[in-house]
Amino acid sequence: MRVSRSIRPAGTLLTATALCLGLAVVSAPGAAATTGTGHAVLGAKDGWGSATTGTTGGSRADAAHTVTVRTRAQLVAALGGTNSTNGSNATPKIIYVAGTIDLNSDDSARHLSCEDYSTDGYTLAAYLAAYDPAVWGTAAVPSGAQEDARDASQKIQADKVQINVGSNTTIVGVHGGRLLGGGLMVKNVDNVIIRNLTVEDAADCFPQWDPTDGATGNWNSEYDAVALYNATHVWVDHNTFTDGANQDSAQPLYYDRPYQVHDGQLDITKGADLVTASWNVFKDHDKTNLVGSSNNSPVDSGHLRVTFHHNFWQNTVQRSPRVRYGQVDVYNNYYAPESGDFEYALGVGKFSQIVAEANYFRLPSDIAAAKLIYNWGGTALTDSGNLVNGRATDLIGAFNAANPTTPLAAGAGWTPTLRAQVSPARAVPWLVSALAGAGRL
C-alpha cells in the first residue's frame, strides 16, 4: 500500500494506518529539537554524522546569531558578511531561510542572467565555433581565448551562486524555504546542519566541453546543490533537491552531446567525512550523489564515511550514490527510476565499501534488477534484505549474471552500527513517500 504524499507526518491518520499495517510508527524522523527546529541536533547513533563528537550545527547560537533571511544578501550577511570568507566563520549560527531566495541576484535582489556574468568576450556561439570537433579535434581539452573567457565568466557566477558555509552552522527552511539557481558550499569546515530546504536548479551558465570525456566527449558543469568538500560532521535532512523546470533532458545537443548544465545534488568529496543524509528527496536529475571524486585521491583513504537512510531517489539517472573509497551505509531508501535515461543506482567504485540493506526499488518493466548496480572498478559490496517491486532480490547475483566479466563479491568488509531506526523494507515506500523531503518536519 502506498500512502498519498499529501499525508502529514504527525497526523493521526498516519499513525492509525501504520498501526493497522503493523509497522513501526515514525513520529519524528531525525532528532527532536530542544527549543525549535533550528536547535535540533543529530540524534545518537543516527548514521556516521553522529560518530565521535556528533553533529550539533549552530544549536548553541545566541539570539544575535539566530536570524531569518529572505534574500541572498541577507543570507550572506547571516553567514558572516562576505561570501568569499564566510567559510572561515565558526561562530555558532542558526539561519532560517524563508520563502524563495534567488541566488542569481545582486545585493539589491535584482535577478542576474547568464549575460550579466559573461566577460572577456565570451559567447556560447563563439565557444561552439572555436571548439567544434571538426575544427578543434578530439584529442585535447579546449584552451585559448574562448576557454579562458568561459572560465572567467564561470568564476564570476560562482561568486554569486555558491554560498560558503562556515563551521557550527544550522540552515533551516521555513515557510517554503527555497534556494534557487545555486547552492551551498560546505568546504574545510566541521559541524553543519542543513534541513527542510528545497534547493532547485543549481545551473551553470558556462559548461565546459571536454572531447576526451568518454568515447564521444561530454559537457561538464561546475555547481552542486550542496557540496561537502573536506567537511566533517554534517547532517543533511528533510531537503528536496530538484532541477525544477530546467531539466537536463530538455537541454539542446551541441556536438551531438547533451548540453548538461547541472552537476551533483549532494556531492561528498576531498576527504569529507562523518555525514548523515536522511529523509531527503532527490528528483528529476542525472548525476545525483557522488562520494569521492577521483580514483587516485590519498586524502580520501579512511574518510568518506557516509550514511544514506530514508531518502527518495525519484526519476534520477545515476549516482544514488556512486562511491569511491568510503564506508557508505545505504539503508531504508526508496528508489523509483523512470523508463528512458536510467543508467544505474549504486555505483561501486575503487576502494568502495557500500552496505546496501533493506532498500526498496520500484522498477518499470524495462529496467531489470541487474541494472541497479554498476561496477566502476570496485570489488565487493554488502547486499541484504532489498526488495524489487515487493520481491526479495539478490542484487549482486542479478548483476553478476548479467556482467560475468566484471563480477562483484558479496561482503563490504564492515558492519554498520550507527543506525537509530531501521524500517522493514516493505514499509519503505510508504514511509519515505509520506515523510521525506522539505516541508515534512
Image: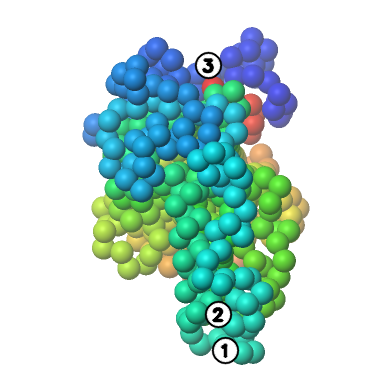
* Tag 1 residue: 137
Q: Is residue 428 visible?
A: no
| Relative to 187, 128 lies left or right | right
Task: First in sequence, mark 2 or 3: give its number.
Answer: 3
User: Disc count in the image?
Assistant: 3
Name the residue at 44% across, 44% down: 163
Q: Residues within 10 Å of mark 3 (few under 14, many from 20)?
A: few
78 or 42: nearer the viewer: 78
Q: Name the mark on residue 211.
A: 2
Query: The N terminus lies in which quarter of the figure?
Result: top right
Q: Name the mark on residue 27.
A: 3
Is residue 231 depicted above or below 46 in this figure?
Answer: below
Is residue 212 depicted above or below 65 in this figure?
Answer: below
Contact (Cβ within 8 Å) of mark 1 with mark 2: yes
Q: Residues within 10 Å of mark 1 (few under 14, many from 20)?
A: few
Residue type at numbered disc 3: Ser
Residue type at numbered disc 1: Gly
Residue 294 at what x, y percent from top left?
38, 65
Is residue 264 depicted above or below 406 in this figure?
Answer: above
Residue 19 at what x, y percent from top left?
61, 14
Q: Name the mark on residue 219.
A: none
| Relative to 341, 101 lies left or right | left
Is residue 217 depicted above or below 392 in this figure?
Answer: below
Name the residue at 59% across, 23% down: 175
Task: First in sequence, mark 1 or 2: give its number.
Answer: 1
Quadrant location of residue 361?
A: top right
Query: The C terminus lies in which quarter of the figure?
Result: top right
Name the residue at 47% across, 37% down: 73
Work out how far the residue at label 1 is from the one at label 2, CA to CA, in angstroms. 8 Å
Residue 20 at what x, y percent from top left?
66, 14
Task: First in sequence, mark 3 or 1: give its number.
Answer: 3
